[in-house]
Amino acid sequence: MSMKCSNRQVDGITIVDCSGRITLGEGSVILRDTIRELLSKGQKKILLNLADVNYIDSSGIGELVSAFTTVRNQGGELKLLNLTKKVHDLLQITKLYTVFDVKDEEAAAVKAFG
Amino acid sequence: MTDHRVSYTLDSTLETVDSAEQTASRIAAETGFGEDEVMQIAMAVREAAVNAVLHGNAYDPGKKVSVDFERTGHDLVITIRDQGRGLDLSKIPDPLAPENLLKTSGRGIFLIRSFMDEVHIHPSQTGTEIKLIKHVHGQTAGGKEASQ
């Protein structure tokens, strides 16, 4: 299953609903382009909903890190929402779970932005 | 488990990475591993194939990646070889070190080691060979007991 991202706005926060696989190649590129496009439009408060992301490889993990640092470097915030168990476990073993701000409830996540 | 070996020679493309992962998933499931272990094996093979295609052969159409799957009595052994310059193990950073946590690459070998029971990496001037071993646990995998 290929990667897809769609955006919606909730209380000034851009929620990016992702589905599929974030892996080397198309999946990583789609995520990168999505973040780049949002930043170019000034949308710097981004909630990445990964509920339907069933697979991520080391390249995809790198892309999440890149998204996180790119948004932060532009004065924005990026949080993760609704991790699947597989993605959660990967972020745990790579020690990234504490780096990302991970949420499991959308309304609370939206309120958590500064 | 019946001893069995299959070998593939593949181009240095992203399709090879997907193909190796899918084949690993199928063979791991046929071997009797559980869902989580199948995912781990498939992901380790994917990461090793990425290394072979990207860092080893650098997408060179003249270079091939070979992938062998061998089911022995007690192990699933997967060997992936590229035709690159040989991986420099001293240049692989610790991805868990605080200064490396926010790096966007360098986690492939770490994930492979996390998911497999044994990992043997043999770099040479004619390429890198990485051998991934997952032990079969119990009779449900069709494996023979160690005493047999």
Image (spheres, rainbow, N blue to C red):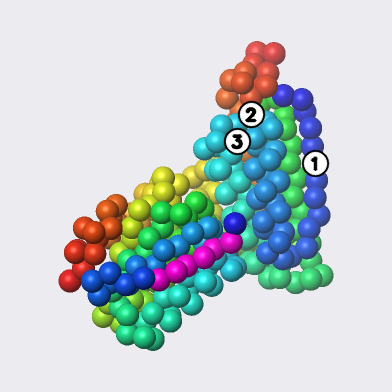
The C terminus of chain B, quarter of image: top right
Tell me the tag on residue B32. 2
* Tag in front: 2 or 3: 2
Q: Residues within 10 Å of mark 1 (few under 14, many from 20)?
A: few
Amino acid at dot 1: Val
Residue B130 x %, y %? 66, 50
Q: Residues within 10 Å of mark 3 (few under 14, many from 20)?
A: many
Kindly indicate the quadrant of the structure image that contains residue A101.
Answer: bottom left
* Pointer 1 or 2: first along the chain: 1
Amino acid at dot 3: Lys
* Pointer 2 or 3: first along the chain: 2
In the structure shown, which secondary structural element does the residue marked by tag 2 occupy? loop
Subunit ID for the residue under disc 2: B
* Tag in front: 1 or 2: 2
Both marks 2 and 3 on one chain: yes
Q: Which residue is mark 3?
A: B134
Residue at horizontal 64%, vertical 67%? B54
Instruction: Estimate the spatial distance between the alpha carbons at disc 1 and disc 2, rounded to whole Å.
Output: 17 Å
In this view, which residue lies farthest toward the top? Answer: B147
Q: Residues within 10 Å of mark 2 (few under 14, many from 20)?
A: some
The N terminus of chain B, quarter of image: top right
In the structure shown, which secondary structural element does the residue marked by tag 1 occupy? strand
Subunit ID for the residue under disc 1: B
Residue A41 x %, y %? 36, 86
Q: Which residue is mark 1?
A: B6
- Residue range corresponding to the magenta coloring: A2-7
Instruction: Estimate the spatial distance between the alpha carbons at disc 2 and disc 3, rounded to whole Å.
Output: 12 Å
Residue A44 x %, y %? 30, 78
